[in-house]
Image (cartoon, grey):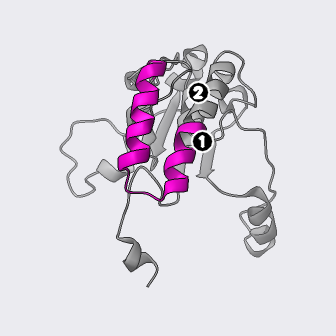
Amino acid sequence: MTVSFSGWISESISAIMDGDRSLPVRVLRPLYLLYEGAFLSVTSRYPIGTNVFELDWDALIILDACRVDALAELAPEYEFLEGVDSIRSVGSSSFEWMNQTFRTAYQEEIRDTAYVTQNGFHDRILGKGGITGQALLPIGPSHFDVVDPSDLGYLEGLWRADFEDDSSGRSKAKSPRASIHGTRPTGPFELVGRSTVNA
């Protein structure tokens, strides 16, 4: 969410003084948000990369935070990975990627797409004008031109799905295109305590 510069200064000082993270992290975070706001100011008007809705596909599997070089190295071990290719993404983070991908300029293609996602940022972005969520940006866009969730052929957030109960009345996806968006366990969710993960 974009805040006034004085509000950002006030919040940054408060986070530096009272935060529960290490001092270097508390100092660098406001500087990173300043950079991110400036970067988003430019890329929200002049997107870089290739939007997936500009490409021809029937099924798209998005491996969020997957390194192409690591996938290419493993590809010979799996028959279904016939070739590993990459394109320049329209975003370097989930927030930026979703805001740049689900733009109203691609509404016709989006309407024909079923989007099943494990990424929790879709809730914060679609239907909320692409707000930045909890990050306080001193500069940058306060709104992105994104579609409403009802504009998708089908939308499902996997962490909310009740696989035992099919009484929701929602129709099953009948869209001609399907996009599955998987992500490794990362923010904004902590699945288990750190001590358990490292054990």
Of the image marks 2 and 1, the number of the one nearer the N terminus: 2
Look at the numbered discs 2 and 1 and tell me whether their residues touch, using CB distance below 8 Å.
Answer: no
Residue occupying the point 38% across, 51% down: 19
Q: Is residue 100 left or right of residue 67?
A: left
Horizontal and vertical percent for residue 174? 44, 35
Question: Quadrant of the rendered structure where residue 157 is?
Answer: top left
* Disc 2 versus disc 1: nearer the observer: 2
Please name whichever residue, 139 or 51, is drawn nearer the observer in this view of the structure: 139
Which residue is identified by label 2?
A: 37
Which residue is identified by label 1?
A: 93
* Number of numbered discs on residues: 2
Badge 2 amino acid: Gly
Secondary structure of residue under mark 2: helix
Horizontal and vertical percent for residue 125? 44, 30
- How crowded is the residue under tag 1: few (<14 C-alpha within 10 Å), some, or many (20+)? few
Q: Residue furthest bottom?
A: 199
Give the quadrant of the N terminus.
top left
Badge 1 amino acid: Ser
Q: Which residues are magenta?
A: 2-31
Residue occupying the point 81% across, 72% down: 76
Secondary structure of residue under mark 1: loop
- Check residue 14 for magenta coloring: yes
Question: Quadrant of the rendered structure where residue 171 is?
Answer: top left
Q: CA distance from mark 2 to mark 1?
A: 13 Å
Residue occupying the point 53% across, 46% down: 27
- How crowded is the residue under tag 2: few (<14 C-alpha within 10 Å), some, or many (20+)? many
Q: Is residue 23 visible?
A: yes
- Check residue 197 for magenta coloring: no
Please name whichever residue, 148 or 100, is drawn nearer the observer in this view of the structure: 100
